[in-house]
Image (cartoon, rainbow, N blue to C red):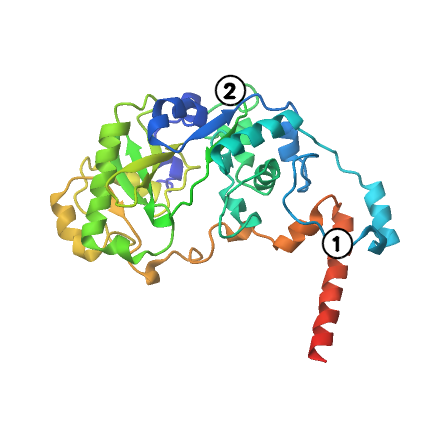
Amino acid sequence: MSSAKSVSDYLPPLTPADVIACQFSSWYPTFSKITFKATVIRALPSNFREYLLSDGVTLPKGSENALQTSTLSDDELSGDEELSMSTEISPIYEFPELDAKIREIIDEYTAVFPKLNWTSPQDASWVLVPSSPLKCTSPADVYLLLKSSDFIIHDLEPERVFEGCGLDIQANVPSYELELVLKKWYPVEGPREIRCFIRDGRLIALCQRDPNFFDFLNEPSTFEQIRQTALRFWTEKVKDTWTGSPNYVVDIYLTRDLSNAHIMDFNPYAQRTDPILFTYQELHEFYSSNAALMDPPGITSPSQSQDLNKTTPSPIFRVIPSRAHVLAGRNIPRHAHNMMPREALEFSQGRTVAALQEVWKEEIKRAMENDSESDG
């Protein structure tokens, strides 16, 4: 009896070179004219990685923290809290040269969106202004997003970066230089983000990247326009220009009229890259069939488009066809499991865990007292 196959059985071999090809600084110079404007900072402080891996959300000295600290004055702090603060001292970091460089780039772009070599802090978008997620206007905003993200840990540990490459983790993990990327910030509309899967140099599938239902994506004419735009854009602007592995994933952002696109990012064709509305087994089947002519049942294209799919060769295009098909747990804010109350983040500035606990208790007590007075 054969054993069940794992995800890796449906993936092509992955090499360190494939991974490096997808880091931002590797592909940006080639595609800079068809992607968002950005600046790569590679001469990072020697202890910058240490800072990002350190506990807590304390920001570097001099980075102009945009958050308001607790309204409690020093006179209101209890003796126990003062003792905790004096006995549990966190390391103090400061990056004046990096701060200056970030400010210089922000002055040029007005606002930026940060990421590291491969990964962006999308899971930490909640820590800044909700109306402008991931919009940074100071070094403090940049550091806050990175420090609040679980995702970016991937780029800080070589073992994670090259996972799946079949390397001896202890001896053969390649070295790479940590980079901070500051993209010019633009408001991004979820339904215009499309993830494209390329296997052996062929675009086999694409799907909406935002896992929510959008009614207009299910209009047959719009559906087909997006598929044709994505295929044309990849064929004319990416296919013959890409010099990395023939197996990769590219995210594109459609123009408002859906007639063209820009590159958002490249990702390895690997387990760490989310297939979103597909599984890697399905993608493998599409690849193996050479020319899939019709979407399989499930979360897929609108039923009206089936005739179009029968006469149009791959790629398969998949969108969420109704609110009832929204994946379990996906109809809540993206990365909601990473969120914590903003007030907790504000109170945490410059405090240890023990001190934060006491301040938080006092604030809860004060809020309850205020509610009682209001009810009275």
- Residue to which mark 1 is pinned: 357
Q: How many marks?
A: 2
> Are circles 1 and 2 on residues that touch, CB within 8 Å?
no
The structure residue drawn at horizontal position 51% and vertical position 19%, both measured from the top left corner, is 174
Q: Is residue 329 left or right of residue 337?
A: left
Rendered location of residue 66, percent (x, y): 63, 44
The residue at 57%/32% (across/down) is 103
Q: Which of marks 1 and 2 is in front?
A: 1
Q: In this view, does 5 lie to the left or right of 342?
A: left
Neighbour tally class for label 1: few under 14, some 14-19, many 20 plus, Cα within 10 Å: some
Q: Which residue is drawn at 13% across and 51% down?
A: 307
Across and down, in percent, residue 117 comes to 49, 29
The image quadrant where one finds the N terminus is top left
Residue at mark 1 to residue at mark 2: CA–CA distance: 42 Å
Three-letter code for the amino acid on which mark 2 is drawn: Pro
Q: Which amino acid does label 1 sit on?
A: Gln
Residue in front for this viewpoint, 147 or 289 = 147
Label 2 Cα neighbours within 10 Å, binned few <14 / some 14-19 / many ≥20: some
Going from the N terminus, do you reach mark 1 or mark 2 first? 2
Q: Nearer the viewer, residue 132 or 369?
A: 132
Q: Name the residue under label 2.
A: 174
Query: x, y (%) of residue 335?
Result: 50, 49
**Which of the 4 quarters of the picture holds residue 158?**
top right
In the depicted structure, whether residue 293 falls above or below residue 108: below
Image vertical order of residue 263 relative to residue 175, above or below? below
